[in-house]
Image (cartoon, rainbow, N blue to C red):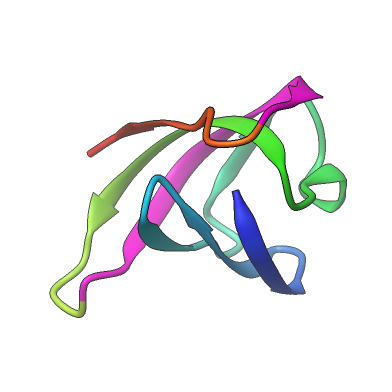
Amino acid sequence: MSGLSGTCPALSFTAGGYRVVTDDNTEFTKGPCKRLSNGMRIDLAGERQSNGTVYAHRIELEKEKEKDSETLAF
């Protein structure tokens, strides 16, 4: 993931080539929202919106940082 902006829980970032947004309904597992950082490996479950962004329902934070290692599910 990259391009992280915003303040928890309202974040925006790019993962797997998609612009992803979060809000207070997004569930963060394996760590709090504030631990999310650029380059972090994540698993994401969300819904593609009509404007092309992905609304994240759930984000699972992973321990290691690896470039281009996101898992996305829509």
Q: Is residue 43 above or below residue 32?
A: above
| Towards the viewer: 37 or 44 | 37
> Does residue 30 show up?
no
Which residue is at 53% across, 28% downward? 69
Which residue is at 77% across, 47% downward? 36
Residue 53: say if magenta.
Answer: yes
What x and y, as percent, mark residue 59? 56, 37
The answer to which image quadrant residue 35 occupies is top right
Q: Is residue 70 above or below residue 16?
A: above
> Does residue 13 show up?
yes
| Towards the viewer: 54 or 2 | 2
Which residue is at 74% across, 52% downward? 38
Q: Is residue 3 above or below residue 38?
A: below
Q: Which residues are magenta?
A: 52-66
Q: Main secondary structure of the magenta part?
A: strand
Question: How many tags in the picture?
Answer: 0
Q: Is residue 32 left or right of residue 53?
A: right
Q: Is residue 53 above or below residue 38?
A: below
Residue 63: say if magenta.
Answer: yes
What x and y, as percent, mark residue 21? 48, 65
What x and y, as percent, mark residue 20? 45, 61
Which residue is at 20% across, 80% downward? 51
Q: Quadrant of the C terminus?
A: top left
| Towards the viewer: 52 or 10 | 52
The answer to which image quadrant residue 17 occupies is bottom left
What x and y, as percent, mark residue 48? 21, 57
Q: Residue furthest left?
A: 50
